[in-house]
Amino acid sequence: MKKRAKFSSKLGIVLASAGSAVGLGNVWRFPTEVGEGGGAAFILVYAFCVLLLGLPLMVAEFIIGRHTHKNTADAYRQLAPRSGWIVQGYLGVFTSWFILCYYSVVAGWTMKYLVEAATGGLGSISDSSAYFSAFSGATWEPLVYMVIVMLLCHFVIIHGVQAGIERSSKLMMPLLLMIIAILVVFSFSMPGSSEGLTFLLKPDFSKLTSAVVLSAMGQAFFSLSIAMGCLCTYASYFTDDVRLPKTAFSVAIIDSIVAIMSGLIMFPAVFSVEAVTPDAGPGLVFITLPNVFHIAFGSVPVLGWFFSVMFYLLLLLAALTSMVSIHEPPTVFLIEHFKLSRPVATAIVTIACIVVGSLCCLSFGPLADCRPLFGLTFFDFFDFVSAKLFLPIGGILISLFVGWRLDRDIIVEQLTNGGTVRLPAFIISVFLFLLRWMIPLAVGGIFIKELGIL
Ligand code: TRP
């Protein structure tokens, strides 16, 4: 049998996993949620969610992946043969594909804005809201950009684990971290930026409703790439000497730092122009910020050009490394399950994503009124089903699986690298307690909330 691929270094492992975690979720969703959820009060709750729910789940996925060294579907088949748990393995494969379909649309938008920023087009937009609607509602342009980013992702995945995923992460992640540091300094140097900082960091506990707490949990899960097979798949390429809890901790720290720094970039910049409450979701990045670039840098166009190019490059890099991690689970499933070659499997996933992604893309324009599924547009449907429905279900199933079903010896062996690393027994007990009780109950809360929306 051909030897299965592995990452070549610990640094590669951390950067690839952090690349999966750091994505569009950090740069636009997190700052908006912080703003709406009471500033530092939200950040505090978010930190608890990352620590108590996100980290154990990430480690749980790592355990399954590294123990089996298989794609998610076959990993569950090996660990729990002829049982219903196999569904969870397939859930990982399919939801990854679902997410990629709509995520690539937004990644395409970021590329369009990068091109516009670089060629100076962004500076001449006076009505950024109308501009965004016209662009995203068009037929061909957003489609072309979506296909381009999908092809970039395809290009990475086709080169495999070391030459593709690892090498691209080692290139893109340091660049991303450097850009974000430059932008923070830049944003702080703008006049009036302290108001934005106050908006972001002033704790307002009165806004901490249960809905906010639940959305902090949802955000933590999405941002850490939990429950969709990405981490499990990456862990199947981990070397035996890498320490799983430590790796998970590094990834969570990098992810949280990028999220907070994104807030530190955006709000001072937004508030230095006018005290507007930023739009949520795409609006913040594609409408509010272009406006900021336009107004703030009207007098110094070179700075505006620099800031906007850097910002959209940051977004594109973040989106690409996440896309790569979502492309890999279905690809390696096809390779191992159906014995396909990597180029063929990669092509199948890419084409399938482009076909369904096109429907998501066009649902902002020509297909806006086509709502065959639950009255939602294609984009909203894929977003809702994968991020809001399957994400909590996957989280609950993984915690129950590792907490109750998985052999304790396997857990101990993976956590201690076969007994070579010392780990106090109480840490393992706390880990199991969180997986068995705390996480299923807490995530059940998110799920019920989402059903309430249905
Ligand atoms: N974590 C990424 C972000 O913040 C998105 C992402 C990648 C993701 N892989 C995932 C989300 C798996 C959920 C599950 O944008």
Image: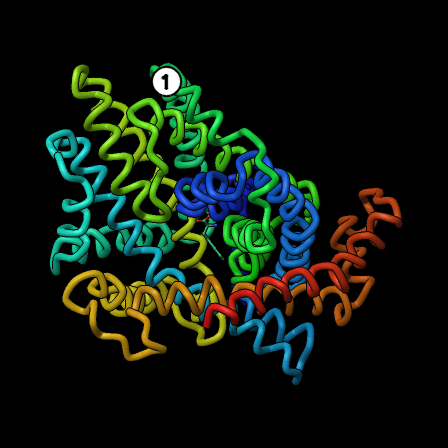
Q: Name the residue at the front extreme.
A: 206
Which residue shows up at 16% across the image and 37% down it?
A: 116
Q: Is residue 300 left or right of residue 388?
A: left
Q: Is residue 14 above or below residue 95?
A: above
Which residue shows up at 12% across the image and 60% down it?
A: 139
Relative image position of residue 374 (x, y in whole percent): 36, 77
Relative image position of residue 69 (x, y in whole percent): 61, 61
Residues 13 and 159: in front is 13
Secondary structure beneath label 1 = loop
Q: Is residue 240 left or right of residue 367?
A: right
Colour convention: rainbow
Which residue shows up at 69% across the image and 52% down it?
A: 56
Residues 357 and 382: in front is 382
Q: Quadrant of the N terminus?
A: bottom right
Residues 34 and 170: in front is 34
Circle 1: residue type: Gly
Relative image position of residue 215 (x, y in whole percent): 54, 53
Residue 10 is at least partly visible in this image: no
Residues 26 and 350: in front is 26
Quarter of the rendering containing residue 115: top left
Q: Is residue 50 left or right of residue 316?
A: right
Q: Circle 1 sits on which residue?
A: 192
Q: Is residue 362 left or right of residue 33?
A: left
Which residue shows up at 58% across the image and 69% down it?
A: 448
